[in-house]
């Protein structure tokens, strides 16, 4: 099965928009720049008028050549028209090109802002590489269609009408011959346009597939190399590139047919006019100067007709890009705007570290009331009536077999996902009633894989607290045991950590993630296996830090190490999406068989003697 076939099976082709939807979407991008476009169009029209005057001046010149009148004045006038027309066209072209770049910039800003606010399920259903392609590649096609194409269609149409009117004033017979040829060949061109649109749409989808495949390979670069999969990945990405090439060539083929048809129409019209016009000159129906002027108008007609064909071609290409952009714009997004001062949910003060929200009190209470949840309708539920209560500051550990739904608890608290049933309360208030930005501003979250972003170490540390002071950063570095690392780095905090923190060890990445969360000074700290890659010394040190933090902050931790679990004020045992039991380590060992089994076999705990050895579930 080819890459294209796989893509078509797994990802639906972008839905085509109706003509009305396409024009409305185009106008949305065009409207903020309409006055600049109008100015550019004005210059284009003036340039077109100067061009229309040139054949008339040439007619006067030919007539004077047969008499004794001086031709100096008309030559100067003709030269001035040519120079003036060129200057005006160049100015109008610059204005339109500059405006086109502004349209692309605005579209990219809007799309970037929207895609970064996508709901997590929407992002998980999408391919990041394809979304990146819509920002980079698809928006580029707006450059022509929202400015040059619209202006070309308008000025080209008006110029063509004006030219035809002037040609008709000179000789209706020759005009009829010209229009007959142009209409015949123009009908053939109109049949080609939908094929250009289809080929362009498929080409853009293939470009998105290239980005998706590249993002996958670069995101697991070490795995690709360790697996000896360079050639296989190269073949897969090359197949996607070949698919884009194939549709690009197909689009180029139909565009070539369209442009060749324009040239054919002009050449056939010229030969027909020359033959029939010559006969009419011989019969005395028209003068030689009229035939010369008519032929000049015919040549001048090439430009507006070409503009109309170009506008139609660009519209077909742009409509394919617009459909993909609109599809991305319709994805569900979160409302992450901060509430206005005095509005509901705006209570609280900013933390000194910049970004978190510090409500009255210390730690936040967390309550799950009969919560049910599944990631998709076609997947089995992850939570079946989960209920527990965390009253405030302190540490609560979640334990249980893999797939029990522990990490999902954190995703629901952060509102990455919405519960299907039941309620989740933070400080007695349903999370759905919290403004998203304010809710997350009160939470520090260390993910299971502890992601580190490309950039400097400082940028990673202050990512969630951009206003943090150097003193606060230094304090957090000491608590996370990163101070020694920073001291030996060549550029200290300004050292670049590489793509996804590739220059750091797994344990260092986890400590960076913990420091980032602590620097935010949250009221609720979520730790998802936050110390799994640390050595024993660093783990014990950070365990003490977490214990210290939990005196003022509510700490929820998904733990697979008994050393962490036994520190918890309460332990929530989960199994198959349900809460089996809640209690302390000693209570659960005595009362819950599953926890007792985990403690005896996987925690490697010797309960009778009270001796504990560290292990992993």
Image (cartoon, grey):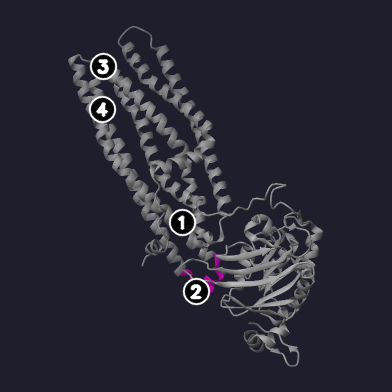
Q: Quadrant of residue 452?
A: bottom right
| Dot placed on the residue nearer the N-terminal end, 4 or 3 | 4
Q: Residues under labels 1 and 4: Cα distance? A: 44 Å
Kindly identify which residue carries mark 4. Answer: 178
Residue 360 is tagged as: none
Q: Residues under labels 1 and 2: Cα distance? A: 25 Å
| Quadrant that contains the C terminus | bottom right
Asked if the magenta segment contains residue 220, the reply would be yes
What is the span of residues highlighted in magenta in the rendered image? 219-231
Q: Secondary structure at mark 1?
A: helix
Please state the horizontal and vertical placement of residue 375, each as a whole percent of the image.
Answer: 52, 67
Q: Residues under labels 4 and 3: Cα distance? A: 18 Å
Kindly identify which residue carries mark 2. Answer: 228
Kindly identify which residue carries mark 3. Answer: 288
The mark closer to the camera, 1 or 4, is 1
Residue 277 appears in the rendering: yes
Residue 463 appears in the rendering: no
Please state the horizontal and vertical placement of residue 505, each as a whole percent of the image.
Answer: 67, 71
- Relative to 124, is 346 on the left or the right? right
């Amino acid at each position: 099965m080819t890459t294209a076939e796989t893509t078509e099976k797994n990802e639906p082709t972008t839905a085509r928009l109706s003509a009305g939807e396409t024009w409305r979407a185009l106008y949305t991008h065009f409207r903020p720049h309409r006055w600049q476009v109008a100015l550019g169009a004005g210059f284009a029209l003036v340039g077109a008028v100067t061009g229309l005057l040139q054949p008339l001046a040439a007619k006067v010149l030919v007539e004077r050549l047969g008499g004794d009148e001086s031709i100096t004045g008309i030559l100067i006038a003709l030269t001035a028209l040519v120079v003036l027309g060129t200057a005006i066209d160049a100015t109008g072209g610059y204005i339109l090109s500059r405006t086109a770049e502004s349209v692309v910039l605005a579209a990219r800003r809007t799309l970037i802002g929207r895609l970064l606010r996508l709901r997590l399920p929407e992002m998980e259903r999408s391919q990041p590489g394809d979304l990146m392609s819509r920002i980079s590649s698809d928006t580029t096609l707006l450059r022509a269609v929202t400015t040059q194409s619209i202006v070309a269609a308008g000025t080209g149409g008006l110029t063509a009408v004006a030219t035809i009117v002037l040609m008709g004033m000179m000789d209706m017979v020759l005009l009829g011959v010209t229009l007959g040829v142009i209409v015949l060949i123009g009908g053939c061109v109109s049949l080609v346009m939908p094929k250009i649109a289809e080929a362009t749409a498929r080409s853009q989808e293939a470009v998105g597939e290239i980005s998706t495949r590249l993002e996958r390979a670069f995101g697991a670069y070490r795995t690709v190399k360790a697996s000896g999969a360079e050639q296989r990945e190269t073949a897969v990405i090359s197949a996607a590139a070949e698919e884009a090439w194939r549709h690009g060539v197909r689009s180029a083929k139909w565009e070539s047919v369209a442009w060749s048809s324009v040239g054919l129409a002009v050449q056939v019209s010229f030969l027909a006019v020359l033959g029939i016009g010559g006969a009419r000159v011989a019969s005395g129906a028209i003068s030689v100067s009229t035939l010369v002027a008519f032929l000049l108008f015919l040549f001048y007609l090439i430009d507006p007709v070409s503009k109309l064909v170009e506008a139609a071609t660009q519209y077909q290409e742009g409509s394919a890009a617009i459909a993909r952009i609109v599809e991305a714009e319709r994805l569900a997004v979160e409302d992450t705007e901060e509430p206005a001062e005095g509005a509901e949910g705006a209570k609280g003060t900013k933390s000194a570290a910049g970004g978190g929200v510090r409500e009255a009190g210390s730690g936040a209470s967390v309550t799950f009331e009969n919560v049910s949840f599944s990631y998709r309708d076609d997947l089995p539920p992850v939570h079946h009536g989960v209920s527990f209560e965390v009253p405030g500051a302190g540490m609560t550990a979640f334990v249980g077999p893999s797939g029990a739904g522990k990490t999902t608890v954190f995703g629901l608290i952060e509102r990455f996902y919405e519960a299907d049933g039941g309620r989740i309360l933070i400080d007695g208030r349903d999370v759905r009633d919290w403004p998203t930005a304010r809710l997350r501003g009160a939470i520090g979250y260390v993910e299971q894989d502890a992601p580190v972003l490309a950039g400097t170490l400082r940028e990673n540390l202050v990512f969630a607290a951009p206003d943090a002071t150097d003193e606060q950063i230094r304090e957090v570095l000491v608590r996370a045991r990163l101070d020694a690392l920073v001291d030996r780095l060549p550029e200290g905090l300004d050292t670049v950590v590489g793509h996804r923190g590739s220059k750091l060890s797994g344990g260092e990445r986890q400590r960076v993630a913990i420091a980032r969360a602590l620097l935010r000074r949250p009221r609720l700290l979520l730790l998802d296996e936050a110390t799994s890659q640390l050595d024993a010394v660093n783990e014990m040190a950070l365990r003490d830090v977490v214990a210290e933090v939990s005196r003022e902050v509510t700490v929820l931790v998904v733990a697979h190490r008994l050393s962490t679990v036994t520190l918890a004020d309460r332990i929530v045992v989960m199994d198959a999406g349900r809460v089996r039991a809640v209690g302390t380590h000693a209570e659960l060992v005595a009362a819950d068989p599953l926890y007792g089994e985990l403690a005896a076999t996987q925690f490697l705990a010797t309960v009778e003697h009270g001796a504990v050895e560290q292990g992993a579930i």
